[in-house]
Image: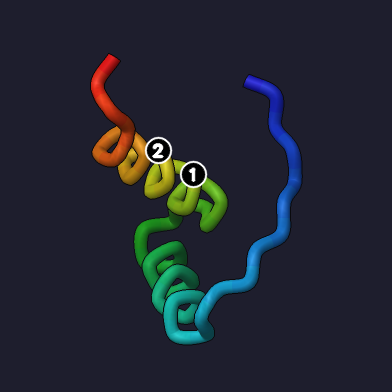
Amino acid sequence: MARKQVTYTLDEELIKRLREYSETTMIPQARIVEQSIIEYLNKKEPTK
């Protein structure tokens, strides 16, 4: 899978929570965000 850098603006509290979770679990923030988006889209997309 090709990767591309993107920029988004997020709520400061959400960024803080993401950073803390990343530090606690040692999972990179980008991986957490990527997996979260995948899970969200899988729930929201109509079944094919």
Q: Is residue 30 left or right of residue 17?
A: right
Residue beneath the point at 44% across and 77% down: 14
Task: State the image coordinates of residue 34 (x, y, percent, origin top left).
Answer: 49, 44
Mark 2 crowd level (few <14, some 14–19, many ≥20, 10 Å Cα)? few
In front here: 10 or 28? Answer: 10
Kindly report the distance in space between the C-alpha atoms of the residues bearing marks 2 and 1: 6 Å
Residue appearing at x 42%, y 46% in the figure? 37
Residue visible at 56% across and 51% down? 30
33 sits to left or right of 7: left
> On the image, which quarter does residue 42 sit in?
top left
Residue farthest toward the bottom in the current orientation of the protein: 13
Left or right: residue 16 compared with residue 6: left
Q: Which amino acid does label 2 sit on?
A: Ile
If the image is split into quadrants, where does the N terminus sit? top right
Vertical arrangement, residue 20 with respect to residue 5, above or below: below
The secondary structure type at the circle numbered 2 is helix
Q: Do the residues labelled 2 and 1 touch (CB within 8 Å)?
A: yes
- Residue depicted at x 72% and y 51%: 6
The amino acid pointed to by label 1 is Glu
Q: In this view, does 16 lie above or below 1?
A: below
The residue tagged 1 is 34
How many circles with numbers are drawn on the protein? 2
Q: Which x, y percent locates residue 11?
A: 51, 81
Residue holding disc 2: 38
Dot 1: element: helix
